[in-house]
Amino acid sequence: MRILIDIGHPGHVHLFKHLAHRIEQDGGEVLFTVRDKECELELLEAEHFPYKNFGKHYKSLWGKLWGLVKFDLEMLWTAFKFKPDLLLSHGSIYASHTAFVIGKKHLSLEDSGNMEQILLYRPFTEVILTPEVLVEKLGPKQIRYNGYHEIAYLHPNYFNPNIEAYHWLGLETGDPYAIIRFVSWNATHDVGHKGLSNEDKIKVVEKLSKKMKVFISAEADLPEELEQYKIRLAPEQLHDALYYADIVVSEGTTIASEAGVLGTPAIYINSISRSYVEDQEKYGLVFNTSESNKVFSLIDQILAEDRSVYRERRKKLLADKINVTDFLYNFIEDHYVKHMPAAISGRADIVM
């Protein structure tokens, strides 16, 4: 089987990487398509996946509109050459449009509920797989499962933390440290929402740096006062660093949720509410607020608790959820691979 996977965010590489490796092990072929936005290319190269880079991601409104045309055409041309049997993505407009034009199926995963994007890809998508906790009802194409995207790559069956993370960060094993994530606020779903002001960003860093080493991951340029804290780490090493961190403070949903799934206490600073983060909040793993004063009190609350408390909460969460990669692999097997000739699927054992 030949699968084309479109990537729109670094987290999407992680979301699909273990599935892609399993498909390759079965004798199938996978091709990733990507826009050069943040660290997607480095992550794909670290996994040794073949990919087609469509160029730089556009940030302005007019750039996004032009990109819709340009990347649609790039995707279509790539698909004509690769000849995929299935297109797979996290809500990719480009993949859905291409699937429709070439007469193939598009399978989408969705966890954000961004209707401005969903309305553009849903008509051309066969199935939309969503976490059970997603509030949005997307119609008859929606199939819910009991998990989150982050579990697909941070489940213990797939992720084993490397304690060398301390040394990668220039620390001694066991040294306390915090990871802070600032986003650029230029995504379409960020309009009208906010995180921390520059003044509060500096205050948070100053508060944490009195007790531990602080590392900042940022999508956009940092205030000059914070540049010294910028994390120097290969992107594929970030999850190891998140696992051993004492606390994570994040404007970005993905890193906050990743921390929660890893059993690292996280403060999610964003006026955008995400249902899966709300679910992790019920487990006492992620705390969501957009009020700067509450951020400081939450930091004190988290650092006063023993770290092992959060590891136990993680065990409870994982016991309640499914292994998302296994679910996705089995879904593709049952709905697509088993209905294909052996010569196409690459699985001679499935045809009687």
Image (cartoon, grey):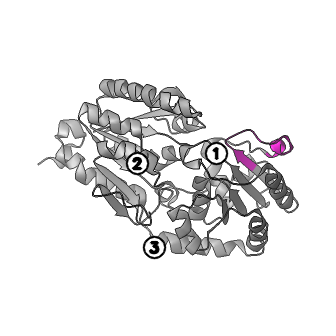
- Pick whichever of labels 2 and 1 is earlier in the sequence: 2
How far apart marks 3 and 1 lie (CA) works out to: 33 Å
Q: Earlier in the sequence, mark 3 or mark 2?
A: 2
Q: Is label 2 in a helix, a strand or a loop?
A: helix
Residue closest to the eye, 323 or 112 = 112
Residue 113 in sight here: yes
Give yes or no for residue 277 being in the magenta stretch: no
Where is residue 99 shown, x and y percent of the image? Answer: 30, 36
Query: What amino acid is found at the position of numbered circle 2 in the picture?
Result: Ile
Image coordinates for residue 58, horizontal then vertical, percent = 56, 31
Residue 275 in the image: state x and y as whole percent: 50, 64
Which secondary structure lies at badge 3? helix
Q: Could you tell me which residue is drawn at 60 percent across and 75 percent down? A: 312
Q: CA distance from mark 3 to mark 2?
A: 28 Å
- Do tag 3 and tag 2 residues touch (Cβ < 8 Å)? no
The amino acid type found where label 1 is placed reads: Trp
Residue pointed to by mark 1: 185
Residue at image location 75% in from the left, 74% down from the top: 301
Q: Position of residue 343 (x, y in %)?
A: 19, 36
- With respect to residue 101, does 202 lie above or below? below
- Mark 3 closeness class: few <14, some 14–19, many ≥20 residues within 10 Å: few
How many numbered discs?
3
Q: Which residue is mark 2?
A: 118
| Element on which disc 1 rests | loop
Q: Circle 3 sits on which residue?
A: 320
Q: Residue at x 46, y 56 (%)?
A: 111
Image point (73%, 75%), residue name: 306
